[in-house]
């Protein structure tokens, strides 16, 4: 498996534009997570899915952020409209629950978003 | 609210020495704790997992301890090498695989 695949790797957009980040989890993984990483706040969990169903979106900063997982192999994180304070690295991660608590999370390479 | 603290200052050590990184947490009762390594421009990579009923875990030159009374985990790298230079993140979790990360500690191993 190629691992968790995110696209694009880098995105520069103007304030007010819509941004869509994409993620392909590892085949067979039941959980998918979206994280945001900044110097000030570290790695923050935004939302996570189990079997394509959103379980906890309490980390989504505001209504401008939305995430979907239409099938087991694809998820999107959308920001509309984007603002400069959304600039960060966004990571997608997936895990496979092995029937016990706590399995390793596999992270993608991240998308570095810059909103100017 | 739950809080996970890692030393935000970089840890500088000499090659061959043992590096010890600390992860403290409050207002939380994790079922397990994980350590990840992150290199610049890349996503975190899993290193070790330790559960609440385990005191210590080892993997090659790595050792993790977990003290649920002190609410602390220590991460040790013995015989450190310049290639060990990276940022190390601890993460706590409970059922459902939801992970909460600390801010990470940057380790610099000098030759």
Image (cartoon, coloured by chain):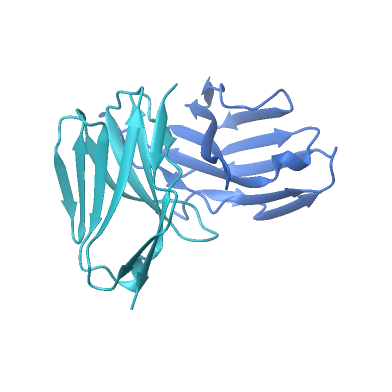
Q: Which chain is cyan?
A: B
Picture layout, residue B33 above or below residue B80: above
Point out residue B38 in the picture as x, y percentages from the top left corner.
Answer: 44, 55
Whether residue B87 is visible to the viewer of this picture, yes or no, is yes
Picture layout, residue A44 above or below residue A10: above
Q: Quadrant of residue A84?
A: top right
Whether residue A28 is visible to the viewer of this picture, yes or no, is no
At x 56%, y 26%, the residue is A59
Point out residue A85 in the picture as x, y percentages from the top left corner.
Answer: 72, 40
Point out residue A20 in the picture as x, y percentages from the top left corner.
Answer: 72, 40
Picture layout, residue B72 above or below residue B36: above
Residue closer to the observer: A89 or A72: A89
Picture layout, residue A100 above or below residue A42: above
Q: Quadrant of residue B28?
A: top left
At x 68%, y 28%, the residue is A66
Residue closer to the observer: B74 or A68: B74
Q: Which chain is blue?
A: A
Residue farthest toward the bottom in the current orientation of the protein:
B111
Point out residue A48 in the picture as x, y percentages from the top left corner.
Answer: 51, 29
Instruction: Left or right? Give the position of B73 relative to A35.
Output: left
Instruction: Left or right? Give the position of B91 relative to A38.
Output: left
Q: Quadrant of residue B27?
A: top left
At x 30%, y 27%, the residue is B30
Instruction: Left or right? Give the position of B81 relative to B98.
Output: left
């Amino acid at each position: 498996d190629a691992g968790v695949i995110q696209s694009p790797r880098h995105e520069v957009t103007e304030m007010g534009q819509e941004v869509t980040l994409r993620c392909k989890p590892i085949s067979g993984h039941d959980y998918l997570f979206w994280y945001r990483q900044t110097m000030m706040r570290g790695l923050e969990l935004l939302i996570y899915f189990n079997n394509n169903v959103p379980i906890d979106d309490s980390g989504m900063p505001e209504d401008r952020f939305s995430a979907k997982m239409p099938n087991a192999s694809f998820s999107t994180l959308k920001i509309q409209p984007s603002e400069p304070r959304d600039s960060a690295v966004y990571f997608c991660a997936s895990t496979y629950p092995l029937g016990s608590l706590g399995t390793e999370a596999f992270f993608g390479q991240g998308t570095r978003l810059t909103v100017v | 609210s739950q809080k996970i603290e890692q030393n935000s200052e970089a840890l500088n050590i000499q090659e061959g020495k043992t590096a010890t990184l600390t992860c403290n947490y409050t207002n939380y009762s994790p079922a397990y704790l994980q350590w990840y390594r992150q290199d610049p421009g890349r996503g975190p990579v899993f290193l070790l997992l330790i559960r609440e009923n385990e005191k210590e875990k080892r993997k090659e030159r790595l050792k993790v301890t977990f003290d649920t009374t002190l609410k602390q985990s220590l991460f040790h790298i013995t015989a450190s090498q310049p290639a060990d230079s990276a940022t190390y993140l601890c993460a706590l979790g409970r059922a459902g695989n939801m992970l909460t990360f600390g801010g990470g500690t940057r380790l610099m191993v000098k030759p």
